[in-house]
Every structure is written in C-alpha cells, then in structure tokens.
Amino acid sequence: MSGPQRGRRYLAVDFWRGIALLTIFVDHVPGNVFERLTQRNFGFSDATEIFVLLAGTAAAFAYMPRFANGEALGGAFRILQRAFQIYMAHIVLVVCCAAILTSAVTMTGDVRFLEAIHLDVLVDNTVPALVGLTTLTMQPDYLNILPLYIVVLAMAPALIWLTLNHPLRGLLASGGLYVATQFLWLNLPTYPLPGTWFFNPFAWQLLFTIGLVIGQSMKQGRTLPTNPILLGLAGAYLLAALLWVQTGFYFTRDFSPVPHFIWAFDKTNLSLPRLLHALALVYVVSRLPMEKWLADNRFTAPFIFLGRHSLPVFCVGTVLALTFQMFRAIVGASLPIDTLLIGAGLLAQFAVAGVLEWHRIGTSRKPAIA
Amino acid sequence: MASHRNEPKARHRLTAALAVILTALCGTPVLAGSITMSDRCRVPDTYLRFATALERTGWRIGHRSPVRIYILGPLSSTARFETELERRLPGINVEVTGGQQAGLADDDFEMLRTAVARLQPDLVIWQVGVRDALASSDVEDFENVLDEANTWLEHRGVDLILMDPPFVPHIRHERIYTPYVGEIGLVSRTEGVPVLRRYAAMQYWSIQREKLRAPPLDTRATQPCVNELLAEAISRAASR
C-alpha cells in the first residue's frame, strides 16, 4: 500500500475495512443469493481475517505514535478506553439482538429461532447468562467478533511495546503464542454454555500483530518491495484456494502426525491455510495503486466512510442481518426478497457512515479513531 | 460422492417428506418396552432404534472403558444428558463435552473436524438442520455435507448420531424445516447413519397431548425428554 504522504490517513485501509464490513453483513444473512459473491467463496479466508488485520493496521496509526513518543502509559490508557467503548457497544448489541429474536419468537411461536443463535440460554438461564454477557463468555452466533476485538485490544499495549522498535521481536512473540495455542489447544472458556470461544483470541492476535507491523511500516513510509517470486507464490496460492473452494473438495484423510492447524481450515484457531490465504490476498492487493485510485475517484468515498466508522456500522449491520434472517425464515426466501433486504441493509450502513462522517467533519478536523 | 444414488434420490426425498407428514397424522402405536423411559417421555419403539450399531461406543461400553461424547449444537442440558446416560450404563464413565454450532452444516463440519482432532471423541452427536432451514440452504448441498461428514468420521472410527430439528406445533412457516428433516432421514436410510428422530418424537408427544386435550406441547419443556430419548437410544444401540 504505497502512495500517500506521511501523516495522512490511508484511504486504502478505510476502504478495505468498509468492504470487509459489507461482506460480514452479507455473510451474516446466510443463504441469501449474494452470499455466493463474498470473499469466502473464492478462498480459505473471509472478511473476518481482513477486518482483524486492518484493525491492527489502524491501531498502529492511532496508538503507536504515543508509544514512540515515550507515552506508553497514555497510549495504553487510550487503547483500553477504546476496548471499553467496544465492550459497551457489544453489550448493547447483544441486548438489541435478544430483543429482536424474542420478538420474532413471540410473534411466531417458533422457539427454534433462539436456539439457532444460542440465545436460548438468556431465556432459560437468565442469571448465569447475564454473568456470561458481562464477562464476554456468553457468545451468541454472529455476536462473537467484538469479544475477540476487545480481548485483542486488551493485548495490544503489550503487542505494540514488543513490536515498536523491533517488529521481528513482536512477530516472534505473537507467532510463539499462536503456535503454542495450536499445540496446547489454548482458548478462553464460554459460560454458561460449555465450550470455548468461537474466535480464539490467542490465535487471532497474530493477524492483529501482523497488521500492527504493516501499519508501523506504512507510517514510517516503508513499503514491501514487489518481489516477483513472492508475488507469483501468493498468486498461485490464491488460485489454488479458489479452485479448492469452488470444487468443494474436502480432506477425508488424516495427515497426523502433521499438526492439525497446518492442514485444516479451522476458523476458530485461524489455521495456517486461512492465515496464509489472508496474507497472500493482502500482499497481492497491496501491489495495486489503490491510494491514487481512491483519491481520484470520489465514488469510492462512501466505502471509505464505512471503514472510518467501523464500530457503529458493524453494530447496525449486525442488528439488520439478524432481523433479516428472521424475516426470510418467516416470509420465505427468494431473489426479490434477498435483493430488497441486502440492498436495504447496505444502504442503511452507507447512510449511518455518511451521517457520522458529516458529523465528524462538522465538529472536528481530527481523524476518527481506529 | 454418491452419484450412484442420484436416480432414486428424488423418490427417496418424496418418501421422506411423506414420512414426515404421515408421522404427524398417525403415531405408531407400539411403545418401547423399556422401563427406564419416564411415562411422559414414552415414544414408539421405532424412535429408539438406530439404523446401525454404534460400533466404537458399543465396543468401549462392552469393555467397560470410558466413553467420550462430543455434542455439537444447542448445549443447554449436556449435564442432564450425561446423567441420563450414566443411569442406563452403570459403571461406565461417560464424559460429555460440547461445542456451539458454527453456522450452516458446512461450517459445522469444519468445527467437527477440529473438535475430533482436539478431543478425540468416541461418539459425535450432531444437532443439525435448524440453521440450514432458517437460511433455506440448498437441500442437495446439505445432504452432501452430511455424507462427507459421515465418511470423514467413519475413516477415523468415530461413531456419529445425527439429531434432526425439534418440532414446534402450530407454526405457520413449519414448511421450512420439513425438507431438512426429510433429508436427514434420507441420509440415515441410504448411508446407514444413526439418526435420533427428535422431530418425529416431538410430533408424537404433541399429538398425544392433543388427543388428551392437554395444552399444546411446550417445546422447551421437552428437553429432559429428548435427553432421555437420546440416552435410551444410545444405550440400546451400544448393547446390540
């Protein structure tokens, strides 16, 4: 990602975050016809990987300068403040989604809606569920990305400190935790339902750290050189993944004693094929002259606004996606309904981002925080 | 993978759908002779019989070895299920762990693969169908995933029980669930995969209540009965 001068906000980072948010929204209405067009149909990784990696990049822009200026404590405080803001957003989001689901259940009598999203525990076991909600250990489906983000942000001060002047040290420490997680099956527990987190923060922190290193390099005006061999390998890997996914090929063999994470496609623990796919994609896309194109093309501005206001856009998208899931189940799924719902959802998110951007420009010249 | 079955599939599918409707209209009158099923949970014997034996689970029980069970799906009562099973298999140490569903059957299969690598269970119980019904997934794709998962687990010598969606009476959009219930039944018949016919059993309880002019079936209150049903069916299959 090359092009802009130092100190400027990178349009490409916001743009791709915006695209990732829209993709997450479309994927969160499973079965809709437009779901076939999203990233996960063309390779091993999906929008979550891109979102987490770019969250690391944005965190490097927003917080690393403080750490670099010797204000590590202030920087850490800002990060934790942001983590708390996301925590509050998560609580509100779960409550809103629970209200939507319970309304749908009341209207139709179909209690399977609650079970499908794992919110039945809130109705059946309210007190433990509230404990689970506040401790982030109750993880209803589609509402498990923000807990990952919160925990990774809580780890961010340490990751930034490790990465700041020694990117390799940061990557080694983060990679070490990733590998240990894969071998020791480390993860956080869920409560009150038994199990572990769907997005394992100990594994996903690696992608965030890689994002930090990328962001730090961009901030310092350093870019990855175009290496023809690396580019060829990345392109070949993306092509192989595309063919693999399109043919619906599954492994029916056990590659033990080769560790599971090397050959599986496990999203929970961010297995290697998924991680490499996301990195290959980022490397190939970063070769494109995105900054110039985005700066010259004002029609891309709405996508940039989405990425700039990622938290409210994500929350709105999640609430709408869940509402639309219920709507499709009750009314029936068809191409016109999918077009109407997905179109309305995308427009609503553009509108939210547009209003927030208009408000931001009107009240402050400061860039939005990551 | 199952191209040789393509021709009779449509007929199977039609039969499966008819079976779902017929079960709703007339429950089989022969009740299970088991004394361990509580009165309110009794069902026709056919609902307690799996298409095939649970080889590994049966072998472990026969050798009085601990049995590890992994349940994928709604997990609100895994502890009660464990108790029910241990009551039927005295002296056998049963360890039940669970994981939340990842999404559609396809995503769940990926989750199963990781869970099997991590926990190495003897038996996997997969509650499947509700999410795909809500999403109106392609029924053919749904069946293919179940086939693939069955083959994959078979290669590892892990037993699999599919559990079809729960039944809720008087739901206007009930039609969204029946194709998936039928498809799970079809996989059971063509591939010999054990299926706990929860949908049919709950329909049976619902009809019994209607006959007695009792209030309609409260689906959420039937979970203890589903636990009994599952435990009873496993203990019978394992002792074959």
Image (tube, coloured by chain):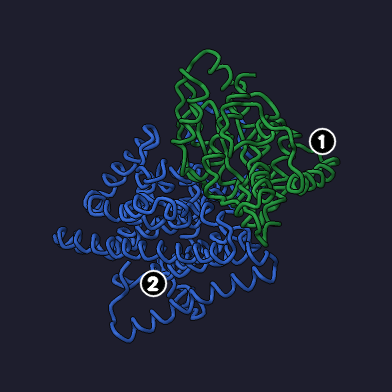
Chain colours: A blue, B green
Kindly tell me whether residue A220 is visible in this rendering.
no
Viewer-side residue, A150 vs A75? A150
Residue marked by disc 2: A309
Disc 1 crowd rating (10 Å Cα; few below 14, some 14-19, many 20+) is few
Which disc number belongs to residue A106?
Answer: none
Residue at image coords 16%, 58% = A72
Q: In the image as oriented, which residue stretches furthest toward the front?
A: B212
Give coordinates of residue B235: x percent, y percent: 58, 24
Residue at image coords 55%, 39% = B225
Residue marked by disc 1: B4
Secondary structure at numbered mark 1: helix
Kindly tell me whether residue A255 is visible in this rendering.
yes
Give coordinates of residue A58: x percent, y percent: 34, 63
- Relative to B82, is A68 above or below? below
Residue at image coords 64%, 68% = A338
Secondary structure at numbered mark 2: loop
Q: Quarter of the image for the C terminus of chain B: give it.
A: top right
Q: Quarter of the image for the N terminus of chain B: give it.
A: top right
Viewer-side residue, A121 vs A271? A121
